[in-house]
Image (tube, rainbow, N blue to C red):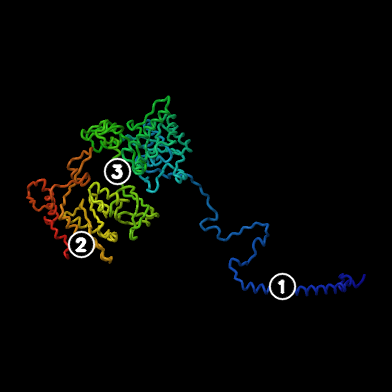
Amino acid sequence: MDADLYDEFGNYIGPDLGSDEDESEEEWEKEDQQDDIEEDDQGDDQMEQDDDAQMQVVLHEDKKYYPTAQEVFGADVETIVQEEDTQPLTEPIIAPVKNKKFLLAEQDLPVTTYEIEYLADLMDNTELIRNVALAGHLHHGKTTFVDCLLEQTHPDLKSKEESEIRYTDTLFTEQERGVSIKSIPVSLVLPDSRDKSYLLNVFDTPGHVNFSDEVTAAFRLCDGAVIFIDASEGIMLNTERLLKHAVQERLAITICINKIDRLILELKLPPADAYFKLKHIVDEVNGLLSVYSEGLDDIVVSPLLGNVCFASSTYRFCFTLMSFAKLYTDTYGYGVDHRDFAKRLWGDMYFNSKTRKFTKKAPLNTSPRTFVEFILEPLYKLFAQGPLMIHTTKQYPSRDATAFHVLGRVLSGTVYAGQQVKILGENYTLEDEEDSRIGNIGRLWIPEARKRLGEFFQTKYDWDLLAARSIWAFGPIRSVHYMTPHCIVSKVADTSNLSIVQNNNEHSLTSPEQKCTGWAKPIAGDDNRFLPVTFLPELIHRGFDKALPTSMYFSKALDYATPRLMEPCASTSRLCFISVHSVSTTKRSLFHHWQIVPGDPLDKSIVIRPLEPQPATHLAREFMIKTRRRKLHCGTITAYWFYDRLL
């Protein structure tokens, strides 16, 4: 064994490789030198890059503190990164189990005007049970009509102004879309015209043609069907299909002409035209029934037979000829049978006010039919007395661009100058009334009224056309329908600045006119004219206090003219069986027209003797003196009080 191959501890070290070690050491030294050179070059480059990096502006979101997930896991691994507050605090970590609800349901029995036990007892008597299906075209008012019945029997159910109750629309989708999808039955206890109670099982059926299977299911369970028809739209395609289906099922058919308020408020038909519209619907239904009932008993509907009713689900009323006639007999009585009266409220029937009899021949060419006179005209008056509602869409600036003239349409009520109204903005709601304010209506204008109004006064009252076209203002003013002051501006006057003082002069003319004759009553038929008009350059001289002395001269001129006193004349209705005392004590409720009292109220030559009847020519003077004495005024009117004291 070669001892050189082992060390002193006996470990094998191999042969001597001195030459290789020298070469390797030289190579290592060269590599170290090369690495040092490269490191020096890289160090110089790094120093240059560090210098450049120190000069750069790095945003916070561009700074990189940690390697990205792609750099750590590789491009082949899909990674998802979430922040700590990704899940909101309102959501629990473990969500509870929720039971989804698709329909509305009452938790307790609703409060009704009758006892529930009474409803259950009526089920024992089948003769007092009626199963009725309400059918009709889409949006013809079936669900709203059921709401009317529920409001009548359920005191706690009240509809809101913005939305209806839609009690039978139990599905959330029905409430959201406003369309019935399922046929829903409702059991109610309702009385008839003789106050006899019946148990009504009412089916509210869908009106959409896609849900006709629901209508079929309801027809199979019912004894009769009420077909709803919109008075404005008339008979639709689905209405014809439902009539045919009801005839095939041999159901008792009743027609309900709903939404008759649309004839008054939307179509604005005269009462006579509204009657012909309703009659046309009834005739068209009878024509369809005669076609569908071939081989069967003829089915006829007519208001005289009691199987046609008229309703307005929105305004919560429904009536037949029998029920409306009963309202008259219950109110006025006098032994009139409502059944006989109801037979004379449809068709070509007229009422002769002189003979107080019903005839089939019109006493005059303008005589209305009984349905128009006794039913439609009272309804029209009822809707005409509604609240004032104006829809404004346009504003026109005044001549001096200091105000706007508003153009709008009066939807209901009557508008007067000076009337206080509530102005509603676009963002106004019943819950938030911030976008609203109270204001007063200014002057009322008629579009293109100057030319046409001038021709009207020229042809009817023989006015000068030049003066008639220069009309500045005319009544009514301040809600007084019989006050008609005319303020005429002649062409010889300087009208360039007239619009600036127009409101001031109009107001100054109104106040003294009501007091110039001492009655504190409005004046009608006076003609006031500005002939020479001079405007001072300063605006301070054009106010109300400066226009008031001018109006005094108008008052003085009225006293030196020939004024006449007017008295109101009243008239009574044809069927108004009221005593004369009650009519006379009703102030202005039966006003008909104004009539001139004979005589001159300012004729001082007339001597009024106390406790003696005066001739007809002295009545105006007598009324004036006694009225002024009752108001603690002197009996004689003196024009001196209306002079300008400074002049």
Q: CA distance from mark 2 to mark 3?
A: 46 Å
| Total numbered badges shown on the rendered structure | 3
Task: Look at mark 2 in the image and give the residue it sits on.
Answer: 549
Front residue of 630 and 156: 630
Tag 3: Cα neighbours inside 10 Å, few (<14), some, or many (≥20)?
few
Which residue is depicted at the point 52% across and 51% down?
A: 96
Image: 288 above or below 627: above
Q: Which quarter of the picture shows residue 105?
A: top left
Q: Position of residue 639 (x, y in %)?
A: 14, 58
Query: Which residue position is annotated with label 3?
Result: 382
Give SS at disc 3.
helix
Image quadrant in which the N terminus is located: bottom right
The spot of residue 352 in percent (x, y) is: 23, 34
- Whole-percent x and y of residue 374? 28, 37
| Residue 334 appears in view | yes
- Answer left or right for 439 relative to 206: left
Residue under circle 1? 42
Q: Is residue 478 visible?
A: no
Between label 2 and label 3, give the one nearer the viewer.
2
Q: Position of residue 626 (x, y in %)?
A: 12, 52
Q: In which quadrant of the rendered image does the C terminus lie?
A: bottom left
